[in-house]
Image: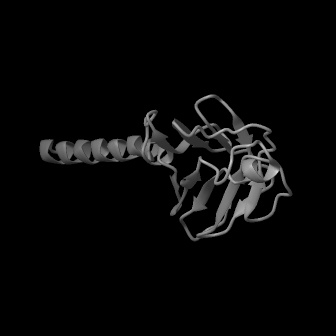
Amino acid sequence: MTRLTRLAAGSLAATALLGTAALPADAHTGMHHGWRVVIGEVQYNSPGSDDYSRRSLAAEWVTITNTGRQRVDLSGWTLADTARHVYRFEDLTLRGYESVRVRTGSGLDTERDVYQGSRTYIWNNDGDTAILRNDRGRFMDAKSWGRDRKYHHHR
């Protein structure tokens, strides 16, 4: 093998190694096989009076959206805030380009709305962060508002 051939082979190996090292970063961003699951809208200040009624608590929500074409099984995924209120998704699959609202209060889960069953407000009006993790605990997305604006939208 000539010196030039060895240099070219070494360069190709280094490029391949760098490409492999970049894969976990893509996984960290929530991009998998052409789909990405993200936090969409957050309704942290429920309309009307904050009277802890079932209606008022259900009016506080976070939207989770599958931005790709393929189905994504959210079973075991979690949505949490900075105070460590955690909602764990159970037996829920999002079809391509589909969204689900995670409502704070109680109600009957559907394909479009799931309920945390909380008797108190979770998403703080003056600032908070919604954090989405997959079933392995890997960070997928976060969205902040108010004075605790750690993330605007971080993927």
Percent x, y of residue 63: 61, 56
Percent x, y of residue 5: 18, 48
Which residue sits at x=73%, y=46%?
104
Q: Is residue 1 shown to the viewer in this render?
A: no
Q: How is the image coloured?
A: one colour
Q: Quadrant of residue 112?
A: bottom right
For the residue pair 147 and 6, the one nearer the viewer reads as 147
Q: Residue furthest front?
A: 49
Q: Is residue 148 above or below residue 46?
A: above
Which residue sits at x=61%, y=68%?
70
Q: Say left or right for 86 vs 66.
A: right
Q: Say left or right for 119 vs 85.
A: right
Which residue sits at x=31%, y=44%?
13
For the residue pair 6 and 76, the one nearer the viewer reads as 76
Which residue sits at x=23%, y=44%?
11
Q: Is residue 110 shown to the viewer in this render?
A: yes
Number of numbered discs: 0
For the residue pair 25 and 118, the one nearer the viewer reads as 118
Q: Is residue 131 above or below residue 100?
A: above
Q: Say left or right for 92 vs 79.
A: right
Q: Quadrant of the N terminus?
A: top left
Q: Residue furthest right?
A: 108
Q: Residue furthest top?
A: 83
Percent x, y of residue 48: 66, 53
